[in-house]
Amino acid sequence: DVKVTQSSRYLVKRTGEKVFLECVQDMDHENMFWYRQDPGLGLRLIYFSYDVKMKEKGDIPEGYSVSREKKERFSLILESASTNQTSMYLCASSFIPGAGSYEQYFGPGTRLTVT
Amino acid sequence: AQSVTQPDIHITVSEGASLELRCNYSYGATPYLFWYVQSPGQGLQLLLKYFSGDTLVQGIKGFEAEFKRSQSSFNLRKPSVHWSDAAEYFCAVGARTNAGKSTFGDGTTLTVKP
């Protein structure tokens, strides 16, 4: 089974802190994604990565950056956390070339509270 | 640009009753289509997917969905709902030219009455 793990289930940070959210997948997937999920707004794509060191902005990249130094690991960085970044953050991975597999596999989520 | 609409924000059904969750998509060609389920406090889990071929697809937990190109729809169905099906359900569309990137609907919350 594909496993996507996230470094924390719950995180509380102060305004202005630098926050790192880590995501690791064990299925050699090419693509990895970071979403935030807020009530009534569904899943919104922050950033995604289609290869090591390659990234693209999603729909709401402002205030976030990402890093993918190894294929299995994708980090989301909040450079200076703000209260409007309080949310559930979901990581996902997908895609093995030639396998015809495009569905996404999700981690359990990190509920971040910024005070 | 691709988009997904789930017209029902919240649906309540009685245990044992049938269920249909609606999903309409917008995409210029034949898309990849998915349904995911999210239990409270958890990540999303794939229920089923459509890539090509038979337009009626079977998934896990007794769910099925039918791709109707003429209606741009991919509705999720289950003949008899169980209390454990209470969750949030997301429909998603993926572009064939950008493998792996999907657009999600806003979700439908299912409540099951005893």
Image: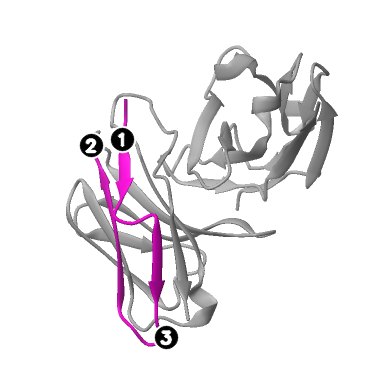
Which three-letter amino acid code belongs to the residue tagged 3? Thr
Residue under label 1, please give it.
A3
Closest to the observer, B82 or B46: B82
Closest to the observer, B68 or A34: A34
| Secondary structure beneath label 1 | loop
Mark 3 or mark 1, which is nearer the start of the sequence?
1
Tell how many labels: 3
Mark drawn on residue A15: 3
Q: Which residues are magenta?
A: A1-26
**Whether residue A6 is situated above or below residue B19 in the rendered picture:** below
CA gap between label 1 and label 3 equals 32 Å
B94 with respect to B23 (left or right): left
B89 with respect to B99 (left or right): right
Query: Are the residues at dot 2 and dot 1 in contact (C-beta closer than 8 Å)?
Result: yes
Mark 1 or mark 2, which is nearer the start of the sequence?
1
| Secondary structure beneath label 3 | loop
The chain to which mark 2 is attached is: A
Which three-letter amino acid code belongs to the residue tagged 2? Asp
Which three-letter amino acid code belongs to the residue tagged 1? Lys
